[in-house]
Image (cartoon, rainbow, N blue to C red):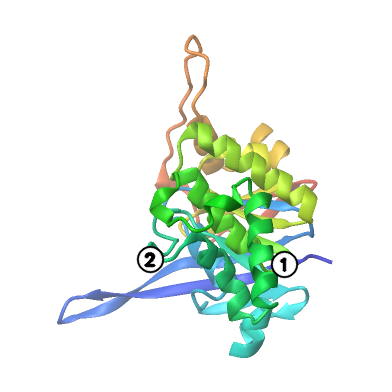
């Protein structure tokens, strides 16, 4: 049974057109459907504005969806009461994109990591302090630095603090929203390797949201390609990268930088007018779907 199932998820935003104009509706997420198996890393990729982050936040109900269905551990997330949702969020956590703005600058690292335990009233004060030190070690940080403020850590260390906070409640699903895009390339590799190591040790499941296709190819088991709120292609990562079926996916993959300076890249020009967003996904190979 899938850990997470998303069916026909829709999120619309109203956009004002001034004093006299009628507001227009922007459909940021348009009939998105996918499922994630326990222990899997499922990637959502696409350009900025494609609806990846909104999809992730709708799943957690950080943004309320307009319509659709989200089932987590066979529970209807969108039908949960506020108290039921609070309990469910112990199993569903998020790591935000920007480690600089996702941590409260007025709180010490100890308080930041301990906060979920306090909110959910878990453990005594001594047990929480021990748990916070354990989490710091788990993500590769020195517990001796727990009383520092966020500005006293590097970008990579701040993202590790955010990850420690997300792991505090022993979740089964982590939504990783562009978790390394704000970091230097050398630090990105360290954080990605940490995510892989933690997944193996803690039996985690990831929804990995990214625009860097090299990272997606390295970490994800399956991937879905989004464009203007819709999934245009979805399948096992190796097969999709080897034989992309949709023109948009081929254009995205052609933009991946080639490290060999003697190899001339072949960029594929993308004609946005050629895509029909009304086309449903159809199976093009075993476990491989495309809107063609």
- The residue at which mark 1 appears reads as 4
Residue 79 place in picture, x, y as percent: 64, 87
- The residue at which mark 2 appears reads as 106
Can you tell which quarter of the image residue 19 is in?
Answer: bottom left
Q: Of label 1 and label 2, which has the lower sequence position?
A: 1
Residue 288 place in picture, x, y as percent: 72, 47
- SS category of the residue bearing label 1: strand
Q: Residues within 10 Å of mark 1 (few under 14, many from 20)?
A: many
**Residue at left 44%, top 61%?**
102
Residue 13's place in the image compared with 227, above or below, is below
Is 249 on the left or on the right of 102, as rendered? right
**Residue at left 45%, top 53%?**
99
In front of the other: 218 or 252: 218
Residue 236 visible in the displayed image: no
Is 283 on the left or on the right of 253, as rendered? right
Residue 4's place in the image compared with 48, above or below, is below
Residue 171 visible in the displayed image: yes
Is 277 on the left or on the right of 129, as rendered? left
**Residue at left 43%, top 66%?**
107
Residue 200 place in picture, x, y as percent: 78, 48
Farthest residue to the left: give it: 19
- SS category of the residue bearing label 2: loop
């Amino acid at each position: 049974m899938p850990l997470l199932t998303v069916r026909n998820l829709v999120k619309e935003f109203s956009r004002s057109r001034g004093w006299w104009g009628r507001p227009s509706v922007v459909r940021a997420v348009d009939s998105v459907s996918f499922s994630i198996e326990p222990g899997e890393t499922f990637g959502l990729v696409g350009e900025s504005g494609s609806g990846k982050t909104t999809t992730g936040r709708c799943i957690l109900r950080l943004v309320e969806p307009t319509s659709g269905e989200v089932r987590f551990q066979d529970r209807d997330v969108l039908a949960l009461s506020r108290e039921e949702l609070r309990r469910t969020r112990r199993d569903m956590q998020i790591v935000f994109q920007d480690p600089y703005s996702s941590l409260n600058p007025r709180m010490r690292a100890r308080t930041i990591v301990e906060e979920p335990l306090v909110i959910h009233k878990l453990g005594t004060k001594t047990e929480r302090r021990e748990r916070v030190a354990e989490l710091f070690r788990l993500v590769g940080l020195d517990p001796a630095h727990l009383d520092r403020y966020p500005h006293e850590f590097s970008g990579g260390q701040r993202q590790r603090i955010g990850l420690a906070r997300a792991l505090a409640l022993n979740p089964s699903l982590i939504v990783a929203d562009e978790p390394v895009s704000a970091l230097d390339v050398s630090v990105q590799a360290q954080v990605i390797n940490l995510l892989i190591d933690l997944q193996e040790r803690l039996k985690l499941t990831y929804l990995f949201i990214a625009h860097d296709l090299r990272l997606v190819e390295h970490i994800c088991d399956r991937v879905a390609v989004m464009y203007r709120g819709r999934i245009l292609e979805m399948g096992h990562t190796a097969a999709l990268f080897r034989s992309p079926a949709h023109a948009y996916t081929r254009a995205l993959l052609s933009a991946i930088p080639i490290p060999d300076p003697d190899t001339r890249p072949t960029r594929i020009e993308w004609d946005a007018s050629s895509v029909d967003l009304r086309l449903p996904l159809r199976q093009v190979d075993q476990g491989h779907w495309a809107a063609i």
